[in-house]
Image: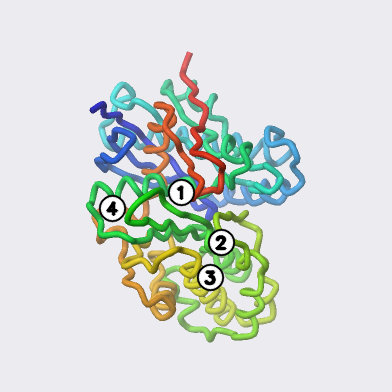
Amino acid sequence: MTWFRSIGMMSGTSMDGVDVAFIETDGKSDVRQGPKGFFPYSDSDRAALREALSEAVLLTDRDARPGALAKAQAIVTSRHSAAIEGFLSEHGLTRSGVDIVGFHGQTVLHRPERRLTVQIGDGDSLAQTLRMPVAWDMRAADVAAGGQGAPLVPVYHRALAEAASLDLPAAVLNIGGVANITFLPQQGDPIAFDSGPGNALLDDLMLERTGTAMDRDGATAAQGIVNAPALQQLLDHPYFARPAPKSLDRNDFSRSAVADLATVDAAATLTAFTAASIAAALALVPQRPTKIIVCGGGARNPTLMAMLAQRCSVDLVSADDMGWSADAMEAQAFAYLAVRALNGLPLTFPGTTGVARPMTGGIISRPV
């Protein structure tokens, strides 16, 4: 068996910063988890990214970087470079001790129905700056082949489940800016799709109403009352009637249904929207999972977790309780995907993105 040492980085749809994680893996079913870290974006960084999100809706060319997008791409690349440098220093790692870096970049537009997905961040420039090989642009090949390009993490969920000899069927639920679920059957490849909103709507509400881009510990939602008509209006979105596999752009949902509610009630309603859409997603998998393992920022929100427990008659377990990582799961996954990209192994599958056949992907940039 050949082991690879890999660092993965993830800047998700919550846009709070860069998660970094080191793993050792064969790119198949063996994974050894190593150190992890988090490097936050500044307020000005987040403002630049939000401006880029607004401008990205006009893109038709995935390589174009007009206006705010060029500025944001430079920020994303620079912050990821600094994150790697800081991570190596903090954990006593050397460049020669890392075989590959997995770089996701920052998604600013995801429209697979137009065969268009855009992640800003210059992987080639990053490889030259870091003097390390970088695997990046891992969604594009799947989308070009007619797949959803998301979620990408399920193949890593499968590897963790195999390494842990997890009783199946089970599911892994990631609640980031968008929520996605991976169903792990007793046999065969995973089934995965975006279930609906994660934290993004609530984060945007809190930023607009309070100036703080999150409902820390679900404290605001805990004080509110769920508005049933507003919740039903949110759940009437046509996305939920579509069959899986399917995926979302961060801005596919609107907060207009809660615009006239007090902040505490709006927060409670949006939190309930996330919980209800996740519960509804369980109807789209072939069997009821015996356990749902929860990761992502939403796993740290006790109000959301309580609402989920009320709606899902399934054992909910934090990834941390499994010996995995609720916070660094996606960064670890991109370290794992980088190794698979390096070795020409599939990243996506018919059951995870709807692509016609298992697809490899990613660009490997090496320092010159």
Q: Which of marks 1 and 2 is nearer the N terminus?
A: 1
Of circles 2 and 4, the one toward us is 4
Q: How far apart are marks 2 and 3 (CA)?
A: 14 Å
Q: Position of residue 197 (x, y in %)?
A: 56, 64
Q: Name the residue under label 3.
A: 277
- The CA span between labels 3 and 1 is 29 Å
Residue at the spot x=44%, y=30% of the render? 341
Residue type pointed to by label 2: Ala
In the shown orientation, is residue 66 left or right of residue 197?
right
Residue 81: horizontal and vertical position, in percent?
Answer: 46, 32
Classify 292 as above or below 232. Answer: above
Three-letter amino acid code at disc 1? Pro
- The nearer-to-camera label among 1 and 2 is 2
The residue to which callout 1 is attached is 40
Q: Name the residue under label 4.
A: 324
Q: Mark 2 points at which residue?
A: 200
